Image (cartoon, grey):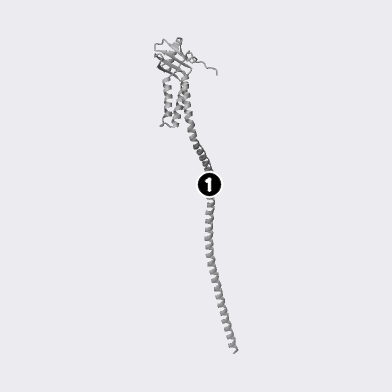
Amino acid sequence: MKRIAVSTAAVASILLGATVANAQDARLKSIVDEVNQANKIAQASQQKIDTVADATAKLFAEYKGVLKTNAGLRAYNAQQRRVITKQEEEIEKIKNSIGQIDEIKRQITPLMLDMIDNLDEFVNADIPFQLAERHERIESLKEAMDDPNVNDPERFRVVLEAYKAEVQYGRTLNAYEDTLPDGRSVDFVRIGRVGFYYQTKDGKETAVWNRDNGAWERKDEYATSVKQLLKMSRRQVPLDVLVLPVAAPKEK
């Protein structure tokens, strides 16, 4: 009986030990499963974290790009505002100028009329060379002022051209054929506005214009010089030094 009791106890002990071992194995397996599950969760979480981190980095890079773009836009806008301010100032100046156009137009017509009258007076008081051509030019100016098809800029242009022509006379050597008041045809020659002469076709009469008394004076002693001057003005001989009577400058 004792031997059986011992055996029974041993069996019970073994069974108990087996049960405990099974329980521990189950517990261990449960722990392992939990750890594996936790690892899977951790891995999934890490993937999410990595995805979020990548997205965050991308957004941050885009944000920096946007900041840089905005900085450029602010600088550009500031520059454009300065340009617009300048343009507005120019527009204001143009508006003011446009507002003065009517006043300028009212003033320019009397100015041109005065210029034509002054030019007419000057030609009449000047040495009497090429008078037909010069008077014809002045008459054309007067006609332009009365012509409704000619605008003010064109009128002003032709008036200035007439003044330029008169200025040019004082810088040129010119010969031409024309008639004296008595109807005789002679050769005239002019040195700017300092000397004005004529010589008859036969060369027997030579005269110089006297500005002081406004009349012709016979100067036959200068016949050779005037004849040579006529040739030089017509490019028949080279320019050379000549002795001629000229109008002396007057003190004012």
Neighbour class for label 1 at 10 Å: few (<14), some, many (≥20)? few
Question: Which SS class for mark 1?
Answer: helix
Q: Position of residue 110 (x, y in %)?
A: 48, 29
Q: In which quarter of the image is the C terminus?
A: top right
Instruction: Kindly identify the residue that appears in the image at 58 percent across and 86 percent down.
Output: 8
Q: Where is residue 88 in the image (x, y as percent from the top left)?
A: 52, 42
Instruction: Kindly identify the residue that appears in the image at 42 percent across and 13 percent down.
Output: 199
Q: Quadrant of the N terminus?
A: bottom right
Q: Name the residue under label 1.
A: 77
Height in image: 25 above or below 141? Answer: below
Residue 238 visible in the shown view? no
Q: In which quarter of the image is residue 9?
A: bottom right
Residue 70 visible in the shown view? yes
Q: Where is residue 239 in the image (x, y as percent from the top left)?
A: 45, 17
Instruction: Kindly identify the residue that appears in the image at 43 percent across and 16 percent down.
Output: 189
Q: Label 1 amino acid? A: Asn
Q: Where is residue 101 in the image (x, y as percent from the top left)?
A: 48, 35
